[in-house]
Image (cartoon, helix red, strand yellow):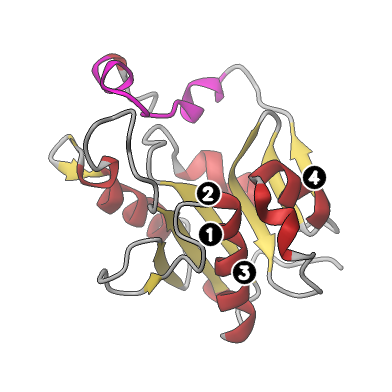
Amino acid sequence: MTRTADTFNITGVVLAGGQSRRMGRDKAMIELDGETLLDRGRALLASTGCGSIRVSGRPGVADAIPDSRPGEGPGHAIFDTLEVARESGQDGVLIIPVDMPGLCVETLTPLLQPTSARCRAWEDHPLPVFITAQGALPDRTEAASVRRLLAALGTEWLAIGPDRSDHFCNINAPDDLASFRNPV
């Protein structure tokens, strides 16, 4: 199945349901340059042209996608997101983690290019990812890990050039935040 790059019918999703244990505080509410990581993620997805923006794992937040299995990891949150996209007639989902503030439009755009693959992600980085919503979903057990789910969905892995390697820095602990330098 070849998909088009019509981003209007793509839902952008910020994965923001983690417990932030290593950080010691809610990562989604951490501010960088006067903007929370959650708002930064939403703005980035809007900049890619996604027709709607949702937040996974944040009950009570507008346009939230609740986790059906809280605490069981992002693979299940991605699976939930795919179910919601399919039910709402979306072509696909562009999913980013809340704790990867170095991402930019230039990092996400290649994921949205036409391909016959069901998913597209950067090598060695299962997130961010674009996944088409059409087609059968694998068994829920495949969502035990993000990599396992992406393998079951048939992911095309893109090579990362040296100019993009800094974009995939995760902010998981206070030291990560202290040493973060925005690559864009």
Q: Which residues are magenta?
A: 163-178
Answer with mark 2 or mark 4, whichever residue precedes in sequence.
2
Is disc 4 placed on a helix, strand or loop? Answer: strand
Q: CA distance from mark 2 to mark 4?
A: 22 Å
Does label 3 or label 4 sit earlier along the sequence?
3
Residue position marked by numbered label 2 in the rendering:
73
Say which label, 3 or 2, has the lower sequence index.
Answer: 2
Q: CA distance from mark 3 to mark 4?
A: 18 Å
Q: Gap in Å between the C-alphas at discs 1 and 3?
A: 9 Å
Residue 74 appears left or right of 170: right
Q: Which residue is mark 3?
A: 82
Residue depth check, mark 1 versus mark 3: number of the one nearer the observer? 1
Residue type, label 4: Glu
**Which quadrant does the N terminus fall into?**
bottom right
Find numbered disc 2 in the image and state the secondary structure of the residue it sits on.
loop
- Residue position for label 4: 156
* Residue 58 rendering spot, x and y as whole percentages: 33, 62
Residue type highlighted by circle 3: Leu
Task: Check the image and report above or below for 125 versus 112.
Answer: above
